[in-house]
Image (cartoon, helix red, strand yellow):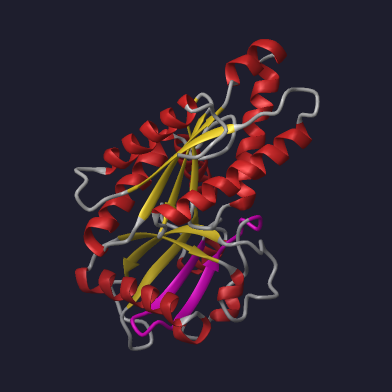
Amino acid sequence: MSLPAELMPAVLDALPDPLFILSESGRYLAVYGGNDTDHYHDGRALVGRRVDEVMPPEKAAQVLEQIRRSLRENRLIKVEYPLAAHEVKGLESADGPGEPLWFEGHIQPLAKQVDGEWAVVWIARNITPRKELEERLRLTSVLDPLTGLFNRRKLLEVLIERFAALRRYGEPCAVLMIDVDHFKQVNDRYGHSVGDEVLLAVADIGRRILRQNDLLARFGGEEFVLVLPQTDLEHARQVAERFRRTLIDGLSTDFPDIPPVTVSQGVAVMRADDVSHEDSLRRADQALYEAKRQGRNRVI
């Protein structure tokens, strides 16, 4: 059984995903479907206009490239892309979500020309929930569950990147090893819940004083590592001292009922003659050990 031809527009309009007919020049020839109103804007106002008229140049160029690729290769093309209503002229005031959405575009050439141009069918399938889940899973893999700082895995990735930048471009980078002094005594005397609060406070204070490109990670237990790109040894020492003093003041205010909580820090910089990023991390760890040997609450 085949449907009568006159029913086909109604069938297409019933689709939950929007279906665009786009010409090789980027003109919107027709728009169907898009009945999933929780996720889509009504794109029918775009009919007759070109993508380079309604989208930013970079977005329009990407759309045109995919249209022409599908026509050139004469096959189905699948692409993933983010798009927000404010990026498309004519949809700014339309019903639908205001935040950017992620789409999977299914682009299939048509066998015949439309209005004298070769054209494609472009179905925009909303994949925002999937992308959000992927991002949550990605963050879970690189974040410490207690403090929300980056974990050891992410730290090592960044150290490898910074060492490569040193080797290739000569960009300096400093590494700080940070240890909360007498942390076991805090846990033993006041309980692990208080110990966790201290670690959370260290993380929060660190976030407030660091630059945008700095990275503070929980290395394990009560140890943290701070990566300072574009920083030499003297400036790194100054950052470490500021961090130490700020932590003393902040932790004393947050935990007035327990003895002052301090930190010891070891500071090192990456060197061009290092074999790998591990050398600077090892030197910072040795400096941290020396800071603890000299009585703690200091920077070496």
Q: Residue furthest right?
A: 257
Residue 114, quarter of picture: bottom left
Front residue of 255/139: it is: 255
Residue 65 horizontal side relative to residue 233, left or right: left
Q: Residue furthest top?
A: 188
Task: Identify whether 24 is placed above or below 85.
Answer: below
Please provide percent x and percent y for residue 153. Answer: 39, 36
Residue 182 horizontal side relative to residue 269, left or right: right
Task: Identify whether 295 is placed above or below 128.
Answer: above
Task: Identify whether 248 is placed above or below 259.
Answer: below
Please provide percent x and percent y for residue 185. Answer: 62, 15
* Residue at 46% from the left image edge and 80% from the top image edge: 29
* Residue at 60% from the left image edge and 80% from the top image edge: 45
Front residue of 8/14: it is: 14
Front residue of 276/74: it is: 276
Q: Which residues are magenta?
A: 18-38
| Count of marks overlaid on the render | 0
* Residue at 41% from the left image edge and 40% from the top image edge: 154
* Residue at 32% from the left image edge and 70% from the top image edge: 66
Regarding residue 254, the answer to whether it shows in the image is yes
Residue 166 horizontal side relative to residue 54, left or right: left
Front residue of 141/191: it is: 191
Residue 268 belongs to the span the image colors magenta = no
Task: Identify whether 118 is placed above or below 212.
Answer: below
Please provide percent x and percent y for residue 226. Answer: 47, 44
Quadrant of the drawing holding the C terminus? top left
Residue 227 horizontal side relative to residue 189, left or right: left
Residue 30 belongs to the span the image colors magenta = yes
